[in-house]
Image (cartoon, helix red, strand yellow):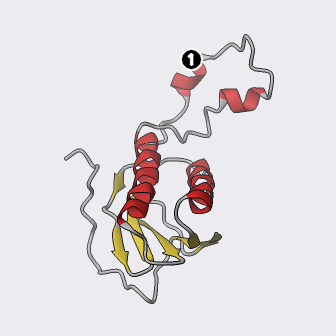
C-alpha cells in the first residue's frame, strides 16, 4: 500500500483510498469498521501524544506506576467529526475534522490499513489530504454522522 500526503488541514481533511478492484460489500464493511473504530478512539481522546506514559516507560511494565495527575493535566486531544464513506468504482473517500488529536492518530490508522490491505482488501494507494482529480469534492460542508447533534 502506497501512502501519500497531500495538502493537509486537520480540520478539513479528506482521506482517499484506491483499491486493486471494486470493493465488495463485506470489504467495504471491514474498511468502515476500521475507520469507525479509529474515529471513536479519537473522539474519546485516545490519540493524545502528551500522555503516552506506558509507551514512554519502555519494555519493563511490571509494577509500573501510572500517574493519573499527569494524565488529567495533559491537554485534550479530541477528534471532532467524521463524514460518511463514499465509493466510486475502485475509490473510497471520507471527510474528517481531526480536531486537536495528535499526529500519532495517522500513524495508527496507516498501520491498521496496511494490515487490512494484507489480509482483507487490497488497498493500492492511500492519500491523506488534498483532492482527487478523478473525483472532485463538492464545495459544501460535510454533514457529520458522529457529531452528536
Q: Nearer the viewer, residue 96 or 112?
A: 112
Closer-to-camera residue (26/56): 26
Say which residue appears at 54% left-offset and 42% top-offset.
Answer: 47
Provide the residue designation for mark 1. Answer: 69
> Visible in this render: residue 63?
yes
Residue in the picture at 43% in, 77% down: 22
Residue 50's quadrant in the figure?
A: top right
In this rendering, the answer to whether 73 lies above or below 14 is above
Give the structural element (helix, strand or loop) at label 1: helix
Q: Is residue 89 above or below residue 92?
A: below
> Residue 55, percent across and down?
71, 32
The reply to whether residue 99 is in sight is: no
Residue 86 placement (x, y as % from top left): 33, 70
Give the quadrant of the N terminus: bottom right
Report the residue that reaches farthest toward the bottom: 134
| Residue sitting nearer the eye, 71 or 81 | 81
Q: How many marks?
A: 1
Q: Position of residue 68 (x, y in %)?
A: 56, 17
Task: From the viewer's perspective, tell me whether residue 22 is left or right of residue 54.
Answer: left
**For residue 13, which quarter of the picture?**
bottom left
Relative to residue 11, is residue 102 drawn left or right? right
Which corner quadrant of the image does residue 126 belong to? bottom right
Q: Is residue 131 left or right of residue 118?
A: left
Amino acid at each position: 500500500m502506497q501512502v501519500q500526503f497531500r495538502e493537509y488541514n486537520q480540520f478539513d481533511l479528506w482521506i482517499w483510498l484506491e483499491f486493486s478492484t471494486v470493493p465488495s460489500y463485506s470489504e467495504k464493511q471491514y474498511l468502515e469498521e476500521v475507520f469507525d473504530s479509529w474515529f471513536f478512539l479519537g473522539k474519546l481522546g485516545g490519540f493524545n501524544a502528551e500522555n503516552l506514559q506506558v509507551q514512554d516507560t519502555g519494555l519493563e511494565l511490571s509494577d509500573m506506576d501510572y500517574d493519573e495527575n499527569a494524565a488529567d493535566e495533559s491537554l485534550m486531544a479530541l477528534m471532532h467529526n467524521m463524514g460518511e464513506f463514499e465509493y466510486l468504482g475502485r475509490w473510497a473517500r471520507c471527510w474528517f475534522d481531526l480536531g486537536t488529536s495528535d499526529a500519532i492518530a495517522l500513524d495508527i490508522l496507516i498501520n491498521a490499513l496496511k494490515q487490512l490491505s494484507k489480509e482483507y482488501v487490497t488497498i493500492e494507494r492511500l492519500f491523506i489530504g488534498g483532492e482527487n482529480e478523478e473525483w472532485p469534492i463538492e464545495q459544501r460542508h460535510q454533514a457529520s454522522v458522529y457529531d452528536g447533534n
